[in-house]
């Protein structure tokens, strides 16, 4: 503002002399005075030329100085305006930067809030889907209930439970069965064993419970009851239960037959040993396997029958039995062979190789 006032003052200062001169030249004068003025002008024309020339030169110098001052003042004014504009622009940029920072923070807060609300919405959606599945499963269970009459006893369960693991029930409830309009389904089977199989169908993995039941029942009622349960599982086509029961039955049979006592009559002499010991010899292994496979004898009955008769040398059989009881130890066999008379050695080797099938 001080610079602008200085410029205006200089401009006024420059204009005032010119304005005075103009007024002097253009001011009105009386006519008498004009004549006298002309005469005076003629008299002093010659002498005033130098003065006029000097005055005019001085005026030109004053005009040049005033113009320089005006230009300098204008330049200073423009520079001052540019500086002011730069400061103004800088202030505007600062304000804009602050505004952008505030908006960025607001946007970040808004983003975090949106993400939080999205997570909450996703959790609510998951809970809703879980509840919807539970409701649907309950409705399906209610709609898919079935009543069974197994051998005169009533059972109530769901179709889904029955047909998930049972080929029998899967074929029965294949989709054409109207569960709402149907009456009680009658199945002419043993009602005593069905609850155990139904519990097996209801559980996801009940193999251990089924195996424990087999051990307890076999020890209390015998293996025949487990065989009956196996037949029921085969009828209902419950493959998982069949596998568990068959494994138990086979294992139990192996244990029972391994320690069965078998009596043999070899050349008039009686020998008693276990099935497991005899089966170490290929001849007896094939013999006993043929009995059980053909159904003529079972391993559990061998001990209760008459002794198995073999028309062979009892001394040779005694050596063989001692060899089998030792776990087929070659040193035991060599020891017995060394005690045989030379005339019996060839008969012994022939008997072991051709009859008992030992190398």
Image: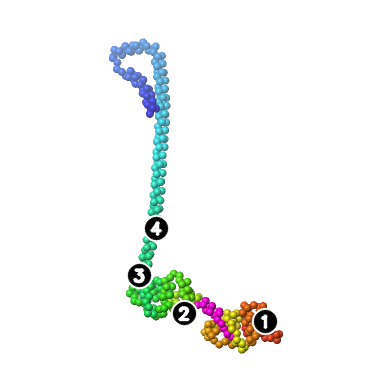
Instruction: Specify the quadrant of the image occupied by residue 93.
Output: top left
Q: Are marks 1 and 4 in contact (CB under 8 Å)?
A: no
Lower position in the chain sequence, tag 1 or tag 2:
2
Expressed as whole percent of the image width and height from the top left, the position of residue 252 reads: 51, 77
Q: Tell me which segment is drawn in magenta.
A: 249-264
Query: Which image quarter holds the N terminus?
Result: top left
Q: Give the CA distance from mark 1 to mark 2.
A: 46 Å
Mark 1 vs mark 3: give the one in front: 1
User: Which residue matches tag 2?
Assistant: 221
User: Which residue matches tag 4?
Assistant: 123
Instruction: Specify the quadrant of the image occupied by residue 33.
Output: top left
Mark 3 vs mark 2: give the one in front: 2
Residue 240 in sight from this viewpoint = no
Q: Give the CA distance from mark 3 to mark 2.
A: 38 Å
Q: Give the CA distance from mark 3 to mark 4.
A: 28 Å
Magenta: predominant secondary structure element?
Answer: helix
Q: Give the CA distance from mark 1 to mark 3.
A: 78 Å
Mark 4 vs mark 2: give the one in front: 2
User: Which residue matches tag 1?
Assistant: 336
Lower position in the chain sequence, tag 1 or tag 3:
3
Lower position in the chain sequence, tag 1 or tag 4:
4
Q: Disc number at residue 142?
A: 3
Expressed as whole percent of the image width and height from the top left, the position of residue 108 reads: 41, 48
Q: Is residue 109 above or below residue 327?
A: above
Callout 4 crowding tier (Cα within 10 Å): few <14, some 14–19, many ≥20: few
Would residue 263 be found to the left or right of residue 6 on screen?
right
Q: Give the CA distance from mark 1 to mark 4.
A: 84 Å
């Amino acid at each position: 503002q001080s610079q602008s006032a200085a410029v205006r003052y200089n401009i006024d200062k420059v204009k005032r002399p010119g304005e005075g001169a103009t007024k002097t030249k253009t001011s009105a004068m009386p006519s008498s005075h004009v004549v006298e003025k002309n005469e005076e002008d003629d008299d002093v024309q010659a002498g005033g030329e130098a003065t006029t020339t000097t005055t005019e030169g001085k005026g030109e110098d004053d005009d040049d100085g005033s113009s320089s001052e005006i230009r300098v003042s204008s330049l200073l004014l423009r520079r001052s305006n540019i500086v002011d504009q730069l400061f103004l622009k800088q202030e505007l940029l600062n304000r804009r930067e602050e505004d952008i920072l505030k908006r960025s923070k607001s946007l970040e807060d808004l983003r975090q809030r949106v993400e939080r609300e999205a997570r909450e919405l996703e959790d609510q959606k998951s809970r809703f889907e879980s509840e919807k599945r539970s409701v649907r499963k309950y409705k399906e269970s209610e709609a898919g209930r079935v009543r069974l009459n197994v051998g005169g006893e009533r059972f109530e369960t769901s179709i889904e439970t029955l047909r998930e693991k049972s080929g029998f029930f899967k074929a029965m409830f294949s989709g054409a069965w109207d569960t709402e309009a149907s009456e009680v389904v009658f199945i002419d089977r043993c009602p005593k064993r069905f609850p155990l199989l139904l519990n097996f169908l209801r559980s996801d993995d009940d193999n251990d419970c089924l195996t424990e039941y087999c051990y307890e029942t076999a020890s209390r009622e015998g293996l025949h009851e487990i065989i009956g349960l196996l037949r029921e599982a085969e009828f209902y086509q419950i493959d998982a239960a069949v596998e568990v029961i068959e494994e138990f039955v086979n294992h139990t049979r192996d244990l029972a037959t391994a320690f069965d006592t078998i009596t043999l009559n070899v050349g008039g002499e009686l020998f008693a040993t276990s099935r497991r010991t005899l089966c170490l010899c290929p001849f007896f292994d094939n013999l006993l396997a043929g009995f059980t496979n053909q159904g003529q004898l079972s391993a559990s009955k061998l001990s209760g029958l008459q002794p198995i008769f073999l028309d062979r040398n009892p001394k040779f059989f005694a050596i063989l039995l001692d060899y089998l009881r030792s776990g087929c130890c070659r040193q035991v066999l060599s020891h017995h062979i060394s005690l045989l008379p030379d005339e019996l050695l060839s008969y012994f080797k022939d008997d072991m190789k051709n009859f008992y099938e030992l190398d």
